[in-house]
Amino acid sequence: MGPARRSSPTTGAAGEEAAALARRRQGMLLASPGALYLLIFFVVPLGLITVYSFATRTSTGRTSLSGWNVESYRAIGDDIIVGIIGRSAWLATLTTVLCVVVGYPFAYYIATRPRHVRAVLLVMVMIPFWTNALVRVFAIRFLLGSNGPASALSESLGFGTFRILFTPTAVTIGMVYSFLTFMVLPLYVALERMDWSLTEAARDLYASGAKAFWKVTLPLTRSGIVAGCVLVFVPSFGSYVVPDILGGAKTLLIGSYIARQFRDARNWPLGASLSVLLIVAMLVAVALNQRSGSGAEDRDRPRPRKWGRAPDEAEAAAVAS
Amino acid sequence: MSGVVEVGLGRRTRRGLAVWAWAVFAFLYVPIVVLVVFSFNASSRVNIWGGFSFQWYGEALRNDVITSAIRVSLIVALVSTVVSMVLGTAAALALDRYRFRGRRALDGTVYLPIVIPDITMAVMLLVFFAEAFKFIDSFGPRFTLGISTVALSHIAFNISFVCVVVRARLDQFDRTLEEAARDLYATGWQTFRRVTLPLIMPGVAAGGLLALTLSLDDVVISAFVSGPGSTTLPVYVFSSIRRGVTPELNAISTLMLTASIALVLGSLALQRRRASASQQTQIL
């Protein structure tokens, strides 16, 4: 990793410095179009929504950007809104738990197949993962509808029609259906990377199968479980499409409630403050996940530095020599 | 690790696992299959099978609103994919191999559009365009929500996804190949054009396919930033579902399903070229 391996001709500290500066400029040039785009179309909107959350709603439903106040944040304490947030949190938690329970044995099965079978099964998981999410929710809507195929089937079997659509149960089914693969993939990765000889060792030491699982396999795949939980909880907490299509009046969740503030209710400050709350909650969840040492480790953790990756370091070494 | 992993499970447990796994596969696939089957239903009642027919496909494709929505979706998807591929790849390269001012800020920001819920991204952009239009209007030209705002919004989230996918590829990049090119007196540009780009191309293509998929999938953000006449197909389907299930919707959904499955298989084939099973999950 020393400067000796650098391929650029070293012409003393001054040349080295100029080269570093040029590199720096090159990097900036390369990054700037994307960075500028994100600045305009993401960072500025993010700032605007925060500003709006402190604005005032006029009697006509317009937003007046004056007379800053925390009224809309105070409104979040309102019973109705607390109820909506509570319900969203509860349904998201339920969805997450169900996904772990359903997904873990599923991922375990796939991860313990022979290699060629595993590859096929993995593709079978990928297809629903990548399939249009709206269409998948629509499929559930179609299946569960009071005059849909499932109902027709149960009727012909003599169980009568069932009314499951527009209930929290339907929303939960839809969320598990939508987000299950988000859980399965990190679980699979954790299980596939696991060193099974450790489980075997536990068995050799006379641990029962169950005990070996609870004491060895499960703790070793904890990172996959945590990552999966974040990947499922985050979208289900803020979900808008699923409850909108499968839920009824009794399943108003925070995502739909925010949408409502920007459309019919025209209370942008309230919608904005709820959005800010939602964003903060998501960031906390993701940060907790990273802290627990999983999830994004493959991408945005400081990686072991490969050669040539750290001009700063090379620079320092060059100066030192 | 190849071959069956022996983990000391009892036979009953093992059989139970297999049954469970196939039940989950059934759960994942049955609703989609039922939807597809019923899209070929000749009967106009959604719950009664009235024989095989392409009738609803014909009806859907004769509907001007639907064909216009398909056109909007395709234009937005293509434009946002191309732009985000270029910007996202450049940003990924910069983040991966350069130190520059603002690098950390960019590194953190680039993940945000992926993390935050669609609905918040949607209202953020709605507020942004409302304010931007107010500002631009004061200079004269009048803008409204339309196909361009949809495309601009899609680029905003697609840049991030492309950037992350390309970076994952750059992570596995063998830098000695570039070094070899430089040792053989290739210029910086030649090295990039002849060595770097071909090597990261599968990553760029995978990022592009992901961007295409996400753009064609998006409903929440599009619903908020599209105006009259710039409805995308998912937005059309979403608003139609609220009014009730029709056989026409089944047909459109099946078309969308076919498109996304083609995209999955395309991206899997791309990865299959070199990646092992564990790397397949990495880009996700």
Image (cartoon, coloured by chain):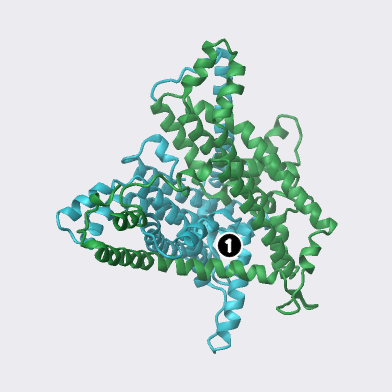
Q: Residue at x 55, y 31 (%)?
A: A221
Measured from the top left, where is residue B199 in percent x and y?
28, 50
Above-or-below relation of B32 to A71: above
Asked whether, in this view, residue B271 is left or right of residue B146, the answer is left
Measured from the top left, where is residue A97 in percent x and y?
67, 36
As helix, strand or loop, the secondary structure at mark 1 comes to helix
> Which chain is drawn using cyan?
B
Q: Residues within 10 Å of mark 1 (few under 14, many from 20)?
A: many
Q: In which quarter of the image is residue A161?
A: top right
Give the residue number, with chain letter if any, for mark 1: B221
**Foreground of the two, B43 or A300:** A300
**Foreground of the two, A167 or B155:** B155
Above-or-below relation of B84 to A236: below
Q: Which residue is drawn at 60% across and 82% down?
A: B134
Furthest residue toward right: A79
Measured from the top left, where is residue A12 in percent x and y?
23, 62
Name the tint of chain A in the rendering. Answer: green
Measured from the top left, where is residue B147 in percent x and y?
51, 70
Furthest residue toward front: A320
Tell me the quadrant of the picture where the N terminus of chain B can be found.
Answer: top left
Circle count: 1
Furthest residue toward bottom: B140
Q: Which amino acid does label 1 sit on?
A: Ile
> What is the chain letter for disc 1?
B
